Amino acid sequence: MLPPQVAVALLVLLLAVVVPLCAVAIQLIRFIHWFAWADKGARGERPHFTGPVLALFFSTLAASDFMGFEPFLTLSALNPVPMEYRAYLMVAMLALSVSCWAYGRSIRDRVLRLGRPGKAGQG
């Protein structure tokens, strides 16, 4: 039997992966509806994927050491961080995941601004 702290940590990591995965699926369904069936004049802005996809990426990295099936095993084997520091890495990845939820669109806008010459200094 697992200690309660480990069970809670596994539940949190499972939620940290499942919630962004569901959000990406919902955004994909919204995008398909927006693209195919929505009224062209009143459909508004297209759904954005930056926040949920980045959150899914970082939460998957956080959960890679605790989940015992693929692709988590491969990610854990490729991780260059020593085992004694993996808990710190997990907390950092979860913090990045939460910040990507909050600032996903501004991250995307900043990256796109870096690609345009002459516009990087404005803001």
Image: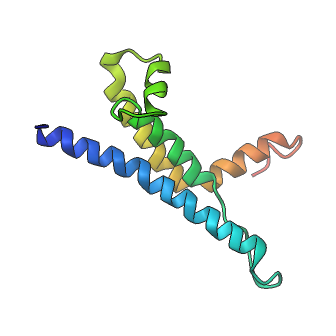
**Residue at the (51%, 46%) spot, across then down:** 56
Q: Nearer the viewer, residue 52 or 110?
A: 52
Name the residue at the right extreme: 118
- On the rendered structure, is 33 left or right of 116? left
Decide: is 91 above or below 26: above
- Screen quadrant of the N terminus: top left
Q: Nearer the viewer, residue 44 or 118?
A: 44
Residue 28, image x and y in percent? 63, 62
For the point 80% across and 43% down, which residue is it? 120
Is 54 located above or below residue 33 in the figure? above
Q: Would residue 55 appear left or right of 69 to someone viewing this image?
A: right
The type of colouring in the image is rainbow
User: Residue at coordinates 43% horizontally, 27% vertically from top-left?
Assistant: 73
Where residue 105 sits, quadrant-wise, is: bottom right
x%, y% of residue 16?
A: 39, 49
Number of marks present in the image shown: 0
Quarter of the view holding residue 68:
top left
| Residue that appears at 48% across and 54% down | 20
Residue 79 drawn at (x, y percent):
47, 21
Farthest front residue in view: 69
Residue 21 in the image, given as x and y percentages of width and height: 50, 53
